[in-house]
Amino acid sequence: MPWFRRKILRASKIDIKPPTANPERAPFALVAIVKNEAAYIGDWMRFHAFAGVKDFIIYDNHSDDETIAILNSFPSLNVTIVPWVMNTAAHKPKMILPRQILAYCHAISTFGGSYQRMGFIDADEFLVPVDANSIVESLEPVQSHSNISLPWVMFGHNTHEEMPTEPVPYAFEQRARHQTGKLLKFKCIVDPCDVTQVSTHKFRTRSMGNGSANMLGKITSNKTRERGSFVTNAGLQLNHYYLRSKAEMQSKISGSAISGADHEQRKGAIMDKAELIEDNPIQDHTAVDFLRRLGINSADEFRKADL
């Protein structure tokens, strides 16, 4: 069969050798791959800094807006920016190696030995402590588990036609009523020195194999996370500000994915999720409630408070 008629395979997971743990590992680092996130990356950084994150490892996929300048505008934080313009494929068999998974592998191999935990999320996802005052404090009850899975909590337009001027936690407080089907995927927090296999939404570790724990300590396999009572927002909630405003959703549909996914397939997936999210959404103030516990009581205070 001619090469141009063959379906090119796409690696869904990559094996990795865990790094050696440094004697004194820092508690936590947040890892993300970004492209042209100037409109929101400041809010993302500030929120997670308020949640106790000091170390950020950012893979930049050739941003040509102010993303890098904004990332460099937080002198009190340890921000590592890695240029990451990757378009790679294995030759035999022909198989695309997704840049996001490769970035995660690089983060674990290069920086993982210095951290007890690493969280792997996107710039439209916020880790929100539900009861505690920091992410690290939230993780204390499950510190014996090397692989933690957090389900998406999918937020919608919140009636915004255009990009709002308020910070993300204040602008978007309406989310999907359900966490099932197309609206349910997971992001993970792992012990990088225990990871043996990497994917975007799941990891394998030496101590837990293909198992993962939720924030209540319940363990199940990666394949069965969507079943039963495993899905919980207790302890640490993963707010996925997926749609943003209607204008921004249209821009998202017309743009390309960092993951390199097929455009038409991605467009259809976004539209399907948008319909489900906007079908009778509910209010969710978890992020604002967290900020209020820290003494941040308004959008203005969020933007001006010292880190």
Image (cartoon, rainbow, N blue to C red):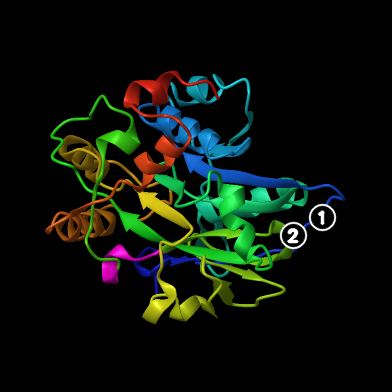
Q: Is residue 22 left or right of residue 199?
A: right
**Do residues under tags 1 and 2 come within 8 Å of each other at their CB atoms?**
yes
Q: Position of residue 99 (x, y in %)?
A: 52, 50
Around disc 2, counting alpha carbons within 10 Å, would you say few (fewer than 14), some (14 to 19), or many (20 or more)? Answer: many
Magenta extent? 180-185
Q: Is residue 251 left or right of residue 81?
A: left
How far apart in space, not on screen, are marks 1 and 2 (Cα)? Answer: 6 Å
**Placement of the C terminus among the 4 image quadrants:** top right
Q: Position of residue 54 (x, y in %)?
A: 63, 35
Q: Which mark is residue 91?
A: none
Using the rendered image of the protein, determine whether residue 305 is visible from the camera's viewpoint. Answer: yes
Which quadrant would residue 42 be assigned to in this image?
A: top left
SS class of the residue under badge 2? helix
Q: Position of residue 235 (x, y in %)?
A: 48, 58
Q: Which residue is mark 1?
A: 21
Which residue is depicted at the point 47% across and 79% down? 223
Residue 288 to residue 165: above or below: below
Residue 302 falls inside the magenta stretch: no
Residue 183 falls inside the magenta stretch: yes
Which residue is depicted at the point 29% across and 41% down? 255
Q: Nearer the viewer, residue 281 or 59?
A: 281
Q: Which residue is mark 2?
A: 193
Does label 1 or label 2 sit earlier along the sequence? 1
